[in-house]
Image (cartoon, coloured by chain):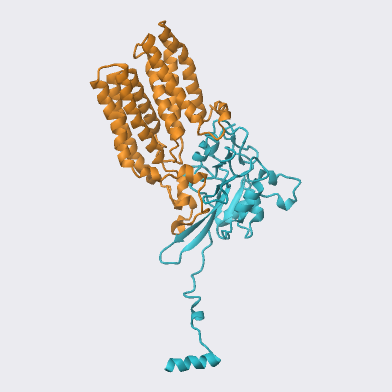
Chain colours: A cyan, B orange
């Protein structure tokens, strides 16, 4: 079971557009909300209202600053979750067979009933996609909302991962990345979608899209507002006091 | 990486235990009766104490038996098989030595091979991880062998073999530290490759995704332990290799002398194993702008 399956015909995954992500963390909240009550044990929090809160999340949004030459700094919001790698190192290290990659659609999952919580899969993942739940003692990770995407009882438009469904700017796209004609594959082809840490050979299914180049910033867009001229009585007082 | 006391205890104690069982199983030192009982007993005690300690770092220790299932792909599973196999296979050899009987050497040699496999598996659990460049190298399993066999020969009372292995251990450990210090940079993992934003300019972590700690940061990012790295390295070499080598050669051969040399060696092994974890940097730290 912990051997990787042959390359699946279908590779479900996400395409994350760093151009449109505004870093609102709605995907983080929606992910925690959905995955707290469906698949597997809940995502626990420790000391949630105390001085050092901590908790299990399957998706985290970083903010990075990119500085190039003398230009203004660019802020890039960067969601980070499981990339459902073709060559997933987290699967083969598992001693119990709890960690596996599905042959039918390439989703990487954890069978929580077989997980002993040794943490080796989290060590093997370069992307920090796996977190050991402190309450349940088992490994949690993105399921690509496997309990939504095939769920016939949900309306058609809800059969996508919770993070994709909730994203207010449409920065997250879900689909079959093995099908070159799918919307996500065309998006990746158009925008040169790329892999994270390709040098590690994990062959991630999820792709990221670079922010689009921006025009040069106006020199001082707020400058006209600073030149305040008083009118009427205040203007007369201003001129009078100026002369004194 | 977080230096979890349970894992440090497990790898050093069971390492030394399997080292001692290996030496005894090969028949390199002929012991009978009470001496056999003490030495084999110590080997079993160290090996099983270490294995027990290892279950303390599991989230669900009651399911530990499941770890035997994936020996085809997982080094952790292979370690479970080799360790349990060695302990079972060597039981009749140990009983024969204690009771004064004899068994064909094939019994002991098979068990000795299982001991080596257990040590190899432990080393490979760490060496296989490409996410931790310092560990992802042949020196990792080599170090696990060297520490275990040095400890085993010290306890078994083979002064010249022990002194030689201590010397080899010191050289290997120094080489592993020196080459390991450069490996993260040499592999070229940076925040630029982690985020793919390197082509746009210099990338810096600006806003972390959460204000508190999380599992990833507790487990993979451990900066505190590196503060005294240079001192600990010196201590590990002196206590782990230099002083025990002098003690085994200088002191008259007796079980208390061997145990004394081993105790000093074990203190060095703990220091070295602490550093093995504390100095290991995981690539996930890059996302947090910390290693």
Looking at the picture, does residue A43 appear above or below residue A97?
below
Rendering quarter of residue A95: top right
Determine if residue B104 is in view: no
Q: Position of residue A195 (x, y in %)?
A: 52, 49
- B123 and B263: which one is in front? B263
Taking the view exactly as shown, the residue that stands out farthest to the front is: A50
Q: Position of residue A25 (x, y in %)?
A: 59, 56
Q: Position of residue B111 (x, y in %)?
A: 44, 16
Left or right position of A49 against B194 = right
Rendering quarter of residue B278: top left
The residue at 42%/17% (across/down) is: B41
Determine if residue A83 is in view: yes
Taking the view exactly as shown, the residue that stands out farthest to the top is: B101
- B14 and B73: which one is in front? B14
Taking the view exactly as shown, the residue that stands out farthest to the left is: B250
Q: Quadrant of the N terminus of chain B?
A: top left
- B69 and A229: which one is in front? A229
Looking at the picture, does residue B256 appear above or below residue A210?
above
Query: In the rendered picture of this protein, how many numbered marks are placed on residues?
Result: 0
- B72 and A98: which one is in front? A98
Q: Position of residue B99 (x, y in %)?
A: 42, 7
The residue at 47%/75% (across/down) is: A220
Looking at the picture, does residue A69 appear above or below residue B245?
below
Left or right position of A137 against B113 = right
């Amino acid at each position: 079971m912990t051997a990787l399956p042959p390359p699946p015909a279908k590779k479900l995954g996400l395409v994350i557009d760093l151009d449109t992500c505004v870093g609102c963390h709605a995907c983080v909240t929606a992910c925690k909300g959905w995955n707290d009550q469906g698949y597997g044990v809940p995502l626990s929090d420790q000391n949630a209202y105390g001085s050092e809160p901590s908790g299990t999340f399957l998706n985290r949004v970083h903010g990075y600053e990119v500085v190039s030459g003398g230009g203004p700094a660019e802020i890039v919001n960067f969601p980070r979750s499981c990339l459902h790698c073709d060559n997933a190192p987290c699967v083969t290290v598992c001693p119990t067979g709890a960690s596996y990659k599905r042959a039918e659609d390439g989703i990487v999952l954890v069978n929580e009933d077989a997980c002993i919580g040794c943490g080796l899969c989290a060590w093997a993942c370069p992307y920090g996609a796996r977190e050991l739940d402190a309450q349940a003692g088992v490994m949690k990770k993105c399921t690509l909302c496997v309990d939504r995407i095939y769920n016939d009882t949900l309306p058609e438009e809800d059969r996508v991962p919770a993070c994709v469904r909730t994203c207010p700017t449409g920065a997250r796209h879900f689909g079959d990345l093995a099908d070159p004609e799918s919307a996500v594959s065309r998006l990746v082809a158009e925008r040169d979608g790329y892999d994270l840490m390709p040098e590690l050979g994990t062959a991630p299914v999820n792709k990221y899209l670079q922010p689009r180049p921006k025009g040069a910033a106006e020199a001082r867009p707020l400058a006209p507002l600073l030149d305040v001229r008083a009118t009427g009585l205040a203007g007369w007082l201003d001129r009078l006091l100026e002369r004194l | 990486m977080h230096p979890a006391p349970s894992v440090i205890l497990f790898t050093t104690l069971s390492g030394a235990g399997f080292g001692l069982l290996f030496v005894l199983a090969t028949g390199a030192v002929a012991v009978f009766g009470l001496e056999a009982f003490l030495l084999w007993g110590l080997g079993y005690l160290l090996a099983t104490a270490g294995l027990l300690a290892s279950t303390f770092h599991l989230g669900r220790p009651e399911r530990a038996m499941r770890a035997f299932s994936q020996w085809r792909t997982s080094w952790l599973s292979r370690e479970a098989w080799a360790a349990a196999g060695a302990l079972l296979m060597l039981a009749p050899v140990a009983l024969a030595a204690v009771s004064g009987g004899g068994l064909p050497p094939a019994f002991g040699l098979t068990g000795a091979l299982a001991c080596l496999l257990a040590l190899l598996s432990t080393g490979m659990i760490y060496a296989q991880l490409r996410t931790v460049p310092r560990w992802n190298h042949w020196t990792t399993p080599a170090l696990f062998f060297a520490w275990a066999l040095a400890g085993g020969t010290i306890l078994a009372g083979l002064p010249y073999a022990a002194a030689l292995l201590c010397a080899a251990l010191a050289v290997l450990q120094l080489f592993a530290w020196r080459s390991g210090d450069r490996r993260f940079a040499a592999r070229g993992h940076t925040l630029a490759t982690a985020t793919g934003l390197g082509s746009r300019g210099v990338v810096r972590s600006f806003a972390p995704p959460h204000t508190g700690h999380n599992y990833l940061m507790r487990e993979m990012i451990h900066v505190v332990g590196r503060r005294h790295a240079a001192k600990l390295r010196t201590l590990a070499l002196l206590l782990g290799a230099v002083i025990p080598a002098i003690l085994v050669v200088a002191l008259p051969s007796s079980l208390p002398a061997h145990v004394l040399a081993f105790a000093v060696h074990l203190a060095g092994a703990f220091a070295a194993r602490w550093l093995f974890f504390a100095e290991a940097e995981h690539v996930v730290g890059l996302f947090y702008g910390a290693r």
